[in-house]
């Protein structure tokens, strides 16, 4: 970075070229009063308080005047003092004087300015206008808007417009009556506000402020427990309570930004419904018991069953260390490979598909590369709801000129920013992508050079494209051919281009094919192995990447080392000092079948809720009821835990140390903020206790740091990861040794396949397993609400409920009219597998013939309806498409 | 960008659309909406927002900045009371007070029956007739509260 030098008040200042005078001054410890400046936002110079004089030029607002070499800046002259005083006084006379009862007291920019310039009380009192009392907006569950304290700096308006691209707020009215308000001056809860709280975090005065504002007595850096983005979080605590949370500006991913769940969704931690003592079921009722008794019972029961009769369900919510321990327990103690977790229900096809084409099943590139990309192809991802902070970045890239192609059966929020929106029918992704690729090939827009040098199997793939004529693709997908051509040309000619996908691609009986289609298009356009390109599966859970990496899967040890390779088996047998099974275990979906067949008799489950999350849930319930012994380890008594024989209270992410691996393979620390609640224990400790009581060695850990060391010694891709290094470095796997700095971009030299080349995969179009017919004429697809997470175990414990409190079946106005339904009417949604009652929401976000539901609400368990037909390769059930009908209640 | 033409919006003249899809088109479109409806309904704001890519909240800010734009339907008769210097010294305040009492509304509001809207303006340009009010396009000067009462009665009868 080029440096320049100039003087402020005669003092020599060195600054980066391009810095404003104010930034240079603040960085050098010189205070210039300012109100409308915020380091995250473009300066606008509207508060007029940061006046400085550049010698021989005159007065300038320092926040938007670039520092130039050799200028002489003065921050104090009689003229500056006069201008600044009038401006400040005009703000202060209209501002309440009750600082002591204001939450921003001691942390308020206006207070700081008043203090700095010195206020003459008599003078101010003379100028004071009769009080104008505007109503305070308390509608939002998390924050208050008090217009009486507003200084009209516009930081909230700019934050909402430029940072999160929602544009809820703006200046209304004029002159003395100007206020910041929402469209139509409505309460914030009724506006388009998404409650991310970014404006609240930036408000320089006490106008926008959180409802709960205790000052924490200590703060700790950790990682958000919601989605796979992995935002850095600073949790504040007092005593044994979490009282605040804010974004970590030093975190490379979110740089301080958060979404509504990350910022406000932590009420679950200290919630009274948390499990605090072990429970055992006696005569159908849970009774509290001691740890000793519970663990003895479990150790005794477990030792009476052999490997094939045991199954472990691990958790993408738990830390890497806990998943490692869980799979070690399953393999080394119980002698089976039957361990799986909810990745089976979300990204199993990504792991299976990308392993075939690229050799490694993870996001190929990194989140921060979004800002430099020229085109973004988002297919089957409702990014704004499921990965909000990535959505902020996508929207900002679009504003910087990147093209955005959205392919989704629903008109999702991102469409507002899209250049091209392809609204295809659910389950027709292969046809759509192959159609686009055919256009790219026919128009000669593919990257020959890249294909020749770095890929294989192109000829076979190319001939498989012949079936995907525009006529065919248009008929199957319902997308007009012009749009398909437009999308093809845009993605192929605006490089580098990043492709993002999520569950819209994977949750199909042809999910692996869908994933392969995305890898084909990246190879075809040479969009892989370079910055700002890649195939980027957005992982849903905070640590679903880590749970897969650490071997909570039935066919691989940590680091995707296959269980059926003798050399690898021997390596682990030696390390763990035991005999291991070489037979891959059963997957999530197969497990419940096996229980019903009477083969599996014992289930040990950590942090999962399959009764709500598994497709065709009644099948799961039937299976669970048939178990001989069921141990559930969780932070709440979930819908599934209620069926357990023993329930063990686990500690939440705030009560333990560990690591999460986010969607871009970044390993990040989770740090203990408070002591475990009640008698609860971290999951790793519980599993180790059971193993020790069963007389097994290799579980004598006293801290997760030791577990991570063992992980590093056995997992090549985590070889260079240690707690010590994570203190100073941002590490993304593969990170094979102590000097390696991690790998932000995969496949840049060669692919991880056997040949080192990226493999094109010929594909055919396969329809979804269950298509609409006369009896079940509608397609049901599933999606997510921004305000809830997964089965809502964590999010239905506080204010988030006020933002969304029930299931709403989204239905197109035409379908609603044909069925004679009105908005908010209660209906029965019926599939071949179940019936669910819910209210409807009539909206043209849904296309005709397609309805959508979330699965957050246990009273309307959507997964009673969904289809458990599975992808033959990845064994993922088809939760995105099933046939239903709607009846009035 | 998708444009959803709602049934309600069909009578809003948008033939200007292609010509105006650029910066600076906001105010002409707002004027066009107001000419079509007599005020600017919410749906029209959302529609314009979609056409121009300007956030609805920002458009609402522009509408509330200009007193010529209205977000609620105006009454059949718009009463403008002059509060300019000449009228002010000739007891315009008394007339205003009387109008407020009689119509049971404040400045900027419309009566429940939808008959009258009361507005205050700075000068109507006929100071020699002060105090003055204007009802739609007709001017009434040298007013007294009694005179105003008679005028209102007439309009109510019509």
Image (cartoon, coloured by chain):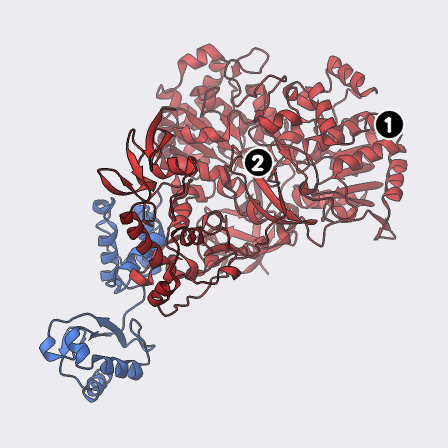
Q: CA distance from mark 2 to mark 1?
A: 35 Å
Q: Of the residues under marks 2 and 1, which one precedes in the sequence?
A: 2
Along the line of sight, the residue nearer the viewer: A768 or B70: B70
- Chain shaded red: A
Q: Does residue A883 appear in the picture of this structure?
A: yes
Specify the colour of chain B.
blue
Judge from the rendering whether residue A416 lies leftward or rightward of residue B20; answer left or right: right
Q: Residue at coordinates 23% horizontally, 82% vertically from top-left?
A: B95
Along the line of sight, the residue nearer the viewer: A746 or B76: A746
Location of residue A879 in the rendering, given as x and y in whole percent from the top left corner: 60, 40
Vertical side of B158 occupied by A450: above or below: above
Along the line of sight, the residue nearer the viewer: A149 or A520: A149
For mark 2, name the chain.
A
Location of mark 1 (residue): A696
* Quarter in which the N terminus of chain A is drawn: top left
* Quarter in which the C terminus of chain A is drawn: bottom right
* Mark 2 crowd level (few <14, some 14–19, many ≥20, 10 Å Cα): many
Instruction: Please tell me if label 2 and label 1 are on a single chain.
Output: yes
Quadrant hosting residue A407: top left
Vertical side of B106 occupied by A681: above or below: above
Location of mark 2 (residue): A230
Location of residue A316 in the rendering, given as x and y in whole percent from the top left corner: 66, 36
Q: Residue at coordinates 30% horizontally, 37% vertically from top-left?
A: A73
Judge from the rendering whether residue A71 lies leftward or rightward of residue A145; answer left or right: left
* Mark 1 crowd level (few <14, some 14–19, many ≥20, 10 Å Cα): some
């Amino acid at each position: 970075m080029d440096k320049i030098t100039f003087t402020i008040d005669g003092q020599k200042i060195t600054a980066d070229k391009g810095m404003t005078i104010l930034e240079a001054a603040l960085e050098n410890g010189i205070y210039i009063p300012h109100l409308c400046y915020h380091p995250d936002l473009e300066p606008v110079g509207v508060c007029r308080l940061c006046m400085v004089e550049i010698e021989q030029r005159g007065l300038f607002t320092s926040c938007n005047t670039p520092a130039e070499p050799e200028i002489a800046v003065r921050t104090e002259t009689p003229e500056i003092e006069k201008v600044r005083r009038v401006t400040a006084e005009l703000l202060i006379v209209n501002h309440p004087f009750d600082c002591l009862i204001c939450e921003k007291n001691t942390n308020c920019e206006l207070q700081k300015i008043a203090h700095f310039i010195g206020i003459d009380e008599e003078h101010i009192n003379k100028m004071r206008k009769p009080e104008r009392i505007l109503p305070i907006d308390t509608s939002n569950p998390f924050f208050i808007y008090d217009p009486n304290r507003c200084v009209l700096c516009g930081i909230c308006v700019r934050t909402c417009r430029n940072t999160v691209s929602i544009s809820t707020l703006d200046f209304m009215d004029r002159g003395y009556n100007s206020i910041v308000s929402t469209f139509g001056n409505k309460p914030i809860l009724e506006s388009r506000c998404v409650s991310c709280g970014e404006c609240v975090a930036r408000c320089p005065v006490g106008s926008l402020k959180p409802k709960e504002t205790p000052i924490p007595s200590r703060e700790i850096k950790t990682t958000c427990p919601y989605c796979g983005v992995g935002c850095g979080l600073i949790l504040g605590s007092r005593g044994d309570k979490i009282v605040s949370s804010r974004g970590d500006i030093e975190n490379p991913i979110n740089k301080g930004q958060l979404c509504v769940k990350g910022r406000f969704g932590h009420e679950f931690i200290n919630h009274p419904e948390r499990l605090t003592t072990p429970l055992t079921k006696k005569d159908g009722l849970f009774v509290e018991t001691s740890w000793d008794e519970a663990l003895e019972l479990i150790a005794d029961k477990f030792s009476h069953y052999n490997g094939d009769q045991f199954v472990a369900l691990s958790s993408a919510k738990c830390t890497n260390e806990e998943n490692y321990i869980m799979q070690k327990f399953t393999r080394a103690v119980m002698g089976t490979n039957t361990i799986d977790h909810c990745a089976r229900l979300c990204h199993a096809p990504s792991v299976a598909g990308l392993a075939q084409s690229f050799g490694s099943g993870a996001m190929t590139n990194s989140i921060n590369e979004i800002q430099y990309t020229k085109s973004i192809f988002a297919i089957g991802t409702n990014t704004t709801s499921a990965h909000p902070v990535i959505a902020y970045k996508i929207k900002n890239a679009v504003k910087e000129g990147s093209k955005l192609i959205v392919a989704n059966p629903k008109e999702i929020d991102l469409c507002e920013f899209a250049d091209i929106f392809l609204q295809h029918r659910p389950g027709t992704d292969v046809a759509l992508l192959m159609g686009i690729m055919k256009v790219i090939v026919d128009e000669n827009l593919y990257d020959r050079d890249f294909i020749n040098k770095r890929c294989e199997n192109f000829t076979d793939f190319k001939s498989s494209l012949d079936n995907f004529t525009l006529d065919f693709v248009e008929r199957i997908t319902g997308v007009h051919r012009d749009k398909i051509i437009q999308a093809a040309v845009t993605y192929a000619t605006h490089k580098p281009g990043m492709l993002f996908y999520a569950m819209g691609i994977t949750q199909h009986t042809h999910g692996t094919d869908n994933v392969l289609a995305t890898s084909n298009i990246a190879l075809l356009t040479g969009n892989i192995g370079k910055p700002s390109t890649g195939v980027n599966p957005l992982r849903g859970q905070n640590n679903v990447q880590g749970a897969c990496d650490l071997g909570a899967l039935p066919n691989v040890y940590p680091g995707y080392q296959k269980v059926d390779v003798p050399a690898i088996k021997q390596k682990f047998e030696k390390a763990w000092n035991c005999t291991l099974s070489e037979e891959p275990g059963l997957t999530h979906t197969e497990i419940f079948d096996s229980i019903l067949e009477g083969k599996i008799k014992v289930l040990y489950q950590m942090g999962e809720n399959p009764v709500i999350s598994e497709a065709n849930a009644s099948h799961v319930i039937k299976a669970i009821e048939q178990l001989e012994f069921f141990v559930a380890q969780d932070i709440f008594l979930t819908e599934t835990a209620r069926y357990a024989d023993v329930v063990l209270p686990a500690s939440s992410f705030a009560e333990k140390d560990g690591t999460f691996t986010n969607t871009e393979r970044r390993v990040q620390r989770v740090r203990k903020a408070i002591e475990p609640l009640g008698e609860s224990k971290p999951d790793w400790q519980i599993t180790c206790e059971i193993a020790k009581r069963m007389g097994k060695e290799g579980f004598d850990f006293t801290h997760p740091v030791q577990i991570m060391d063992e992980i590093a010694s056995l997992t090549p891709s985590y070889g260079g990861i240690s707690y010590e290094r994570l203190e100073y470095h941002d590490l993304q796997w593969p990170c094979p040794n102590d000097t390696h700095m991690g790998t932000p971009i995969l496949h840049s030299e060669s692919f991880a396949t056997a040949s080192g080349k990226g493999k094109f995969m010929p594909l055919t179009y396969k329809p979804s397993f269950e298509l609409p017919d006369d009896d079940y004429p509608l397609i049901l697809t599933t999606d997510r609400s921004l305000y809830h997470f997964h089965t809502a175990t964590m999010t239905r414990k506080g204010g988030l409920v006020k933002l969304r409190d029930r299931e709403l079946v989204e239905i197109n106005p035409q379908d609603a009219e044909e069925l004679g339904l009105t908005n908010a009417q209660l209906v029965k949604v019926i599939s071949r597998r179940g019936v669910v009652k819910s209210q409807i929401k009539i909206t043209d976000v849904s296309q005709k013939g397609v309805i959508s539901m979330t699965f957050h609400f246990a009273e309307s368990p959507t997964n009673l309806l969904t289809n458990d037909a599975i992808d033959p390769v990845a064994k993922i059930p088809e939760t995105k498409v099933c046939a239903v009908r709607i009846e009035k209640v | 960008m998708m444009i959803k033409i709602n049934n309600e919006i069909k009578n809003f003249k948008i033939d200007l659309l292609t010509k105006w899809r650029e910066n600076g088109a906001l105010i002409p479109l707002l004027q066009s909406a107001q000419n079509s409806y007599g005020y600017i309904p919410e749906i029209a704001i959302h529609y314009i927002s979609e056409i121009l890519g300007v956030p609805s909240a920002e458009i609402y800010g522009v509408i509330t900045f200009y007193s010529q734009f209205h977000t609620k339907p105006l009454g059949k008769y718009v009463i403008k009371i002059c509060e300019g210097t000449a009228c002010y010294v000739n007891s315009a305040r008394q007339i205003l007070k009387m109008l407020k009492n009689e119509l049971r509304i404040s400045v900027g509001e419309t009566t429940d029956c939808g008959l009258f809207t009361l507005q205050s303006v700075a000068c109507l340009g006929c100071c020699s007739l002060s105090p003055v009010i204007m009802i739609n396009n007709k001017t009434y000067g040298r007013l007294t509260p009694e005179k105003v009462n008679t005028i209102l009665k007439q309009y109510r009868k019509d």
